[in-house]
Amino acid sequence: MHIGLLIYGEMETLSGGYLYNRQLVSYLRSQGEQVTIISLPYRNYWRHLTDNFNRACLRQLTDAKVDILIQDAMVHPSLFLLNYRLRQRSNVPLISLVHLLTTYDHHSRWSGWFYRAIERWYLQTVTGLILNSQTTLRQVTELLAKPIAPYCLAVPAGDNFKDVKLDIDFIRQRTQMAGPLKIVVVGNVIRRKGLHVLINALRLLPPEDYQVTVVGRLDMEPAYVQQLESMIQRLQLQTSIIFKGPIQGQNLAALYQANQLMVLPSAYESYGIVYVEAQQFGVPVIGTTEGAAKEIIRDGENGYLIHPEDHQALATVLRTVHENRQLLLQLSLNACIAYEQHPKWQDSCEIIRQFCHQLQIFSKK
């Protein structure tokens, strides 16, 4: 079967969604499927809308000659009308891979209505859906307010570090280490990820008790990064918070190993691959009650869930974990158990492969 995957920009882009895409392509090819990556240039939302009237864009998609076209739902502004023309030209199933609905990001009242309308329109043009969480399934259902297209649920995995071996003795020693509580934040530095919430929480705590390492791109929202740097300087937290920039591979694995807690107080996460990654290293996670974090984090058992923007609640949790290292150990051991129970990439990608075959067979009848 020849499968096309439509994305914006480069496959090597650093984000959970693109990591998911790379894992999927690698698995499909390992199973003998032919996969072609089709890329549209990444621009802004309004310019993407013009792709719907671009003959060259339509020709690029039809010339691919695929049996199945998987569309990263991020590309939806370029397709909400174009998909109708694609379906007129062929009976190739169009499958939307939904990592994150733009509708559920924070927008003004007017722009929020507009984004919902475009996204709803797009989702009505596809013949199948790949959804990354129960939360995303619920949101797609609410957005369409009608029976949705056939779908499969394939949650992201966290087994991105193949050579990691669980060492309970090391985890026990790490939790009991004297000195500041070592916290890692893994995520591109954008407002939605909530790093400002963590900084405001640290403002309420003795700065010498906490050491934060931030991993992620710093170029996506420069104004926000500048705001954070000003906060850190004003609160005199320069020695407590370190920005490492984007890190991957074994260097990232080493950071997970070296830290005792992960904090990512996002306003919203459609899933959160890094939550599962952290659990592989026995690192408990603090996330928020919004989005799908609650599908990974069990509050008080293998991590904690706070309400978005609640820096006071976050400060309370950090103080509790720092002062009670036996609790930190139990959270860490439970994180290991949660990771072992989580689906692996092979499991999730096979669900998608079978779904594609089923839709292809159905389209030929």
Image (tube, rainbow, N blue to C red):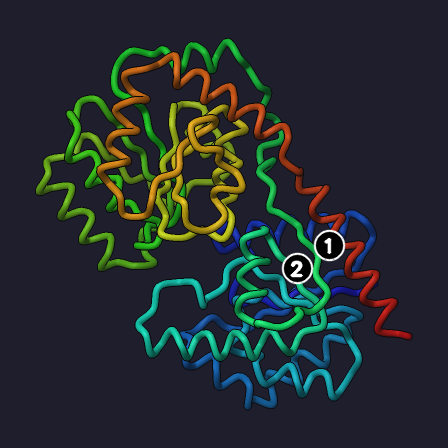
**Is 132 in front, or is 39?**
132
**Which residue does the image show at 53% across and 83% down from the upper left?**
51
Q: Which mark is residue 352?
A: 1
Q: Quadrant of the N terminus?
A: bottom right
Q: Position of residue 169 (x, y in %)?
A: 50, 9
Expressed as whole percent of the image width and height from the top left, the position of residue 164 reads 58, 25
Q: CA distance from mark 1 to mark 2?
A: 7 Å
Q: Are marks 1 and 2 in contact (CB under 8 Å)?
A: yes
Find residue 130 and name its label: 2
| Residue 240 percent location from the top left of the image | 21, 30
Mark 2: amino acid: Ile
Q: Which mark is residue 71?
A: none
Question: What kind of residue is marked 1?
Answer: Ile
Give the mark, 1 or 2, whose residue is nearer the N terminus: 2
Q: Secondary structure at mark 1?
A: helix
Residue at horizontal 91 percent and vertical 75 percent from the top:
365
